[in-house]
Every structure is written in C-alpha cells, then in structure tokens.
Image (spheres, helix red, strand yellow):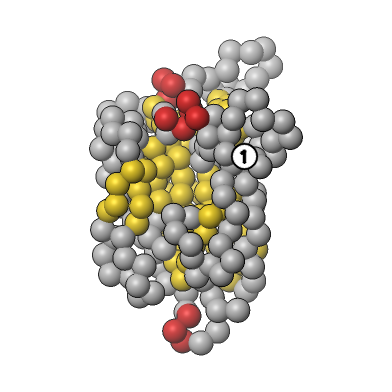
C-alpha cells in the first residue's frame, strides 16, 4: 500500500431535519480523493452518525456511533441478535451500490423490497431501542475486494460499480413508535423486527459517512 492510499478517518456528524422526506446534497468538506459532498436521505428521526473506516489486511473495519438527538425514542436497524454481545465485531452488513458510479455503500438499514417478492435474501432486520440522548455503537468487518450483498434481488440495492473507488457506511434509524416491541409469548423483551418495504423505508432516516478511499488493487 503506497503512502497515498493510507487509511483515512472518515467521520460525519449529520443533523437530520425532522419530518423531511426528500434527498438533499450536503457539503461534507474537502475530501482527499475529491469526493466532495455526501448524499444524505433525510427522514423523521433526528440523529447523528460518527463512523471511522480503516483497512486492516484484506478487510474493511468500520467503527460507528449513532446518537439520538430527537426528543423521543428511536430504533436503530442494526440487525443485532438479542444474544449478541455488545461491542463485538460483526459481519453480514448489506453491500450495494452507492449514490454514484464509483461508490459502494456498506449499510445496516431497510430497503424498499416489494411485499410480494419471492426468494428474498433478508425479509427484514432487527432493531435496537435508542432512547432520547442515548448512543448506540457497532463494529463491522467487510472482506476486500467487496462483494455484492443485497437485501433482495429487487429493491434490495443495486449491484456494485465495476471499478469502485470509495465506500461509505450508512445506518438507518426511525421513531420507536413506528416499530413497537413484539408482544408474542417467548419473544425476548423489547425485541423489534422491521420488514424491508417501501412503507417502512418512508419511516427511516438514513445516515451516511463521508466517502473513504478504497485501497488500490
């Protein structure tokens, strides 16, 4: 790895506007690879994301933190199992095309998968409760070179660019009242499951990091 491709800290704190349901372009400051601004999908849940992306051997390592800046409780679509130890490094994040033809998105989020689609790889994700003012953290490991890992063949994320240069990490959050805990017998307390669907994506706020330059080769 040459000096120009050394790992770089990619950190973005995004303040999301309550109730907005549109895509806006936000200025992310100067980017060493010329990436410039970051596309941010706004939604009904104000929150902030800090993400640090590095390369370790033949993998990406992503450490992220989401802070609930809303007045009420949120959920984070982290797909964490109830028996999973907090702070453990995880695999299995979705890997799809980003907002341009050179960017890959690694994400913990919901996708607009059609309700009647058969053969879905992931029908939904679990969601962790994030009280007002609280912070949730996660650590991800993704092998290089990046492989396409969508939520579904349709609506689950587009295939990767032929020659990706950058990667962003994104995480979805939403108002907790839109995704209540299960009341089924035998289900762990406060366990929440969210299906991939267009309706649920409308309730989601998507927070994304600044682009991180992928290593050459």
Say if residue 82 shows up in the picture: no
Q: Is residue 148 above or below residue 145?
A: above
Instruction: Please tell me whether residue 55 is drawn above or below residue 170 in the rendered image.
Output: below
Q: Position of residue 65 (x, y in %)?
A: 42, 49
Give residue 165's position: percent from left, percent from top.
50, 70
Residue at 40% from the left image edge and 56% from the top image edge: 209
Residue drawn at x 56%, y 70% as measured from the top left: 163
Quarter of the picture containing the N terminus is: bottom right
* Residue farthest toward the bottom in the current orientation of the protein: 2
- Image point 58% across, 58% down: which residue? 160
Q: Nearer the viewer, residue 202 or 181?
A: 202
Which of 163 and 170 lies nearest the eye of the viewer?
A: 163
Name the residue nearer the viewer: 177 or 159.
159
Relative depth, front residue between 60 and 165:
165
Count of numbered labels shown in the rendering? 1
Characterize the local packing of mark 1: few (<14), some (14-19) or many (20 or more) Cα atoms within 10 angstroms: some
* Left or right: 41, with 96 as reference point: left
Image coordinates for residue 71, horizontal then vertical, percent: 27, 28
Provide residue 166's location: percent of width, then percent of height: 48, 66
Quickly name the residue at label 1: 154
Depicted 62 relative to depicted 34: above or below:
above
Q: Which residue appears at 40% of the width and 67% of the height?
A: 9
Residue 116 in sight in this render = yes
Kindly state the secondary structure of the residue where label 1 is placed: loop
Q: Residue furthest right?
A: 119
Q: Is residue 24 left or right of residue 189?
A: left
Quadrant in which residue 146 is drawn: bottom right
The quadrant of the image that shows the C terminus is bottom right
């Amino acid at each position: 790895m040459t000096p120009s491709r050394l790992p770089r800290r990619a950190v973005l704190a995004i303040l999301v506007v309550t109730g907005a349901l549109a895509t806006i372009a936000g200025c992310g400051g100067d980017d060493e690879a010329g990436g410039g601004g970051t596309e941010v999908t706004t939604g009904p849940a104000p929150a902030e994301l800090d993400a640090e992306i590095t390369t370790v051997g033949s993998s990406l390592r992503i450490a992220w933190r989401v802070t609930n800046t809303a007045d009420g409780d949120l959920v984070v679509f982290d797909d964490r199992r109830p028996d999973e130890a907090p702070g453990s490094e995880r695999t299995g994040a979705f890997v799809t095309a980003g907002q341009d033809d050179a960017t890959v998105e690694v994400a913990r989020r919901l996708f607009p998968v059609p309700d009647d689609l058969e053969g879905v790889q992931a029908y939904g994700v679990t969601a962790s409760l994030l009280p007002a003012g609280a912070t949730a953290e996660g650590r991800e490991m993704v092998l290089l070179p990046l492989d396409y890992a969508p939520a579904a063949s349709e609506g689950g994320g587009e295939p990767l660019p032929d020659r990706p240069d950058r990667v962003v990490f994104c995480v979805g959050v939403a108002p907790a009242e839109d995704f209540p805990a299960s009341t089924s017998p035998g289900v762990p307390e406060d366990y929440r499951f969210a299906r991939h669907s267009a309706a649920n994506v409308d309730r989601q706020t998507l927070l994304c990091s600044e682009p991180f330059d992928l290593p050459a080769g």
